[in-house]
Image: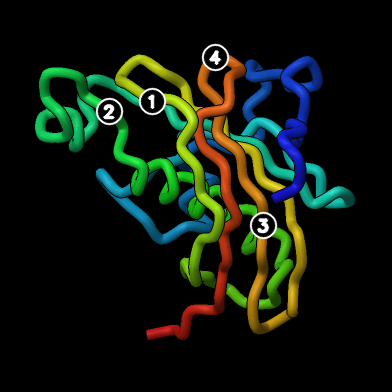
Amino acid sequence: MPGKEIIKPFSELDFSQVIAGRNEIDQYNPQRFEMCQLDAIVHEDLERKICVGYKDATPDEFWVRGHMPDMALMPGVIQCEAAAQLASYFVCKYGLLGVDRIGLGGMEEVRFRRAVVPGDRLVLMLTELKCRRGAVIMCYFQGYVNEKLAVEGKIKGVPLPKV
């Protein structure tokens, strides 16, 4: 993985300036209801291929009741889904893969560094590593809670057929 360098320093982000909320995210991502795992986009840099968004983990999330009820933890698979939704939004909005919809093609080198619990904001950052237009895109992602690395890995997106 690219070193542990932060994709976009927090000092360069303004979380009060939301670029895209749920309605705009929904224009590019098909997930709805409890599967929406991305609340807002706060930074897009098409030239450097960087996108930053976040998911606020609330006490009402569908996983809170059953995923370690004595200490609710955001499941790693949900953190990965949030990263996949960030990738989908950015890749589809800017046509980076040249298709209308992408799906999760795989993940590599994913590491969970700290717990994400209700009340936390999981800040997700993404940068493109390589792209074969029409075939596959690989991105590196990081997730932070209180500016501390919580999750990171590589995520692969592939075209989804229209059904």
Give the residue type at disc 2. Leu
Task: Please name whichever residue, 39 or 27, is drawn nearer the observer in this view of the structure.
Answer: 39
Could you tell me which quadrant the C terminus lies in? bottom left
Q: CA distance from mark 4 to mark 3?
A: 23 Å
Report if the CB atoms under discs 1 and 2 are less than 8 Å apart. yes
How far is the residue under mark 3 from the one under mark 1? Answer: 22 Å
Residue 42 percent across, percent down from the top left: 66, 31
Residue found 72% across the figure and 35% down from its top: 4
- Mark 3 or mark 2, which has the lower sequence index? 2
Label 2: how many Cα within 10 Å (few below 14, some 14–19, many 20+): some
- Give the mark nearest the N terminus, 1 or 2: 2
Badge number at residue 116:
1
Q: CA distance from mark 1 to mark 2?
A: 6 Å
Q: Is residue 102 above or below residue 87?
A: below
Q: Residue at x 44, y 25 (%)?
A: 114
Query: Given the image, on which type of amino acid does mark 4 rest?
Result: Asn
Residue 117 location in percent, x, y? 33, 21
**In the rendered image, which residue does mark 4 sit on?**
146
Which residue is labeled 3 in the image?
139
**Amino acid identity at mark 1:** Val
> Is residue 123 among the parts visible in the rendering?
yes
Earlier sequence position, callout 3 versus callout 1: 1
Answer few, some or many: residues within 10 Å of disc 3's Cα (few below 14, many 20 plus, some between 14 and 19): many
Q: According to the image, label 2 marks what residue?
A: 73
How far is disc 4 from disc 1 in space, using C-alphas? 10 Å
Can residue 88 be seen in the rendering of this structure?
A: no
- Secondary element under disc 3, as helix, strand or loop, is strand
Of callouts 4 and 3, the N-terminal one = 3
What distance separates the C-alpha of mark 4 from that of mark 2? 16 Å
Name the residue located 89 percent from the left edge and 51 percent from the top edge: 47
